[in-house]
Amino acid sequence: MIFKDYYKILGLETNRVTLDTIKIAYRQQAKKYHPDLHIGNKRNEEIFKDINEAYKVLSTPSGKRKYDRMWNHHVGRKHKNTSYEESKRSQDSMFSDFFQMFFGTVENVKTQKKSEAIKGENVQTEVNISIEDAFRGKEQSIAVRTIDGDLKTFKVQLPPGIQNNEKIRLVGQGKPGKNGGKNGDLFIRIKIDNDHKFKLEGYNLKTNLYLTPWEAALSTKVTINGINEDVSVYIPEGIQSGETIKIEGKGYKDGKGGRGDLILETKIMVPKHLNEKEKELFCTLNTVSKFNPRSY
């Protein structure tokens, strides 16, 4: 069996070198003998395989220590000016007989890789919650289907003010690991649903403010239900349908201790059914008023 001087193959004169030095030497030799630069040169192809084989052994502390014991025995301080030598390798194999004799067969290398601990895959799912539940926080039951097709239920405490599209991580609740590896994690994306009352726009909450024609015309002060408290709002005289009123600090939580704004969009509502007195007043208004919205 020919002893292979891996250090000489990498262009190094001694084994007293660091792993970084070995990496640099490998890159230089691999670039020099790369098959793409020597198409059809079988000799250089074999050298290139030996360069990869040498780096495979010397690039890890354990491999280097094991090889150095043989290197010291065959070469040591009396480092001989030996020429480059090849040893046999099976067809299409990247590893020589020398490598397989001392470091195991290619199959053993593959088996070792397969036996490495592998963390399981992460799993992602979504859960929809209302704006009010998201604002206040709540305990939420979440059902996730396992790889076996079974439903597994988790109870998750959603913090008050959780953000739209924010993810909650449940460690170890993903797919199982392999070869003793840890389980993956479960990531739950929170989707906040708008409802008939509130619409979430960033940190702002948008809602409709319904007014009677006389409230819009004369000005007034109304009380509306905010997301967590009643809010008094002054309605200026002559406000138009579709105009907005902003109430600062009464919107959604921004995650930093503050809140966005509450945006009120006015909707002027006309009664569908009038009693006699109301009809009389509207008729009088129609007679005396010079206002014509179609003239604008």
Image (cartoon, grey):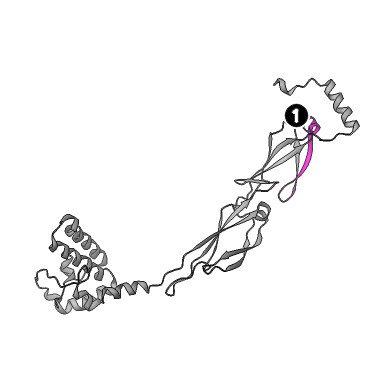
Task: Specify the quadrant that holds the N terminus.
Answer: bottom left
Task: Specify the quadrant that holds the C terminus.
Answer: top right
Q: Which segment is the magenta one?
A: 212-229
Along the line of sight, the residue nearer the viewer: 12 or 277? 277
Q: Is residue 262 left or right of residue 113?
A: right
Q: Is residue 179 left or right of residue 21?
A: right
Along the line of sight, the residue nearer the viewer: 246 or 18? 246
Residue at 27%, 73% in the rendered image: 106
Name the element at disc 1.
loop
Q: Percent x, y for residue 290? A: 79, 20
The amino acid type found where label 1 is placed reads: Gly
Quadrant of residue 76 within the rendered picture: bottom left
Along the line of sight, the residue nearer the viewer: 92 or 249? 92
Along the line of sight, the residue nearer the viewer: 96 or 256? 96
Q: Is residue 179 left or right of residue 265?
A: left
Q: Can residue 257 be seen in this view?
A: no
The answer to whether 285 is drawn above or below residue 53 in the figure is above
Residue at 16%, 65% in the rendered image: 46
Residue marked by disc 1: 238
Residue at 20%, 65% in the rendered image: 49
Q: Percent x, y for residue 70? A: 19, 78
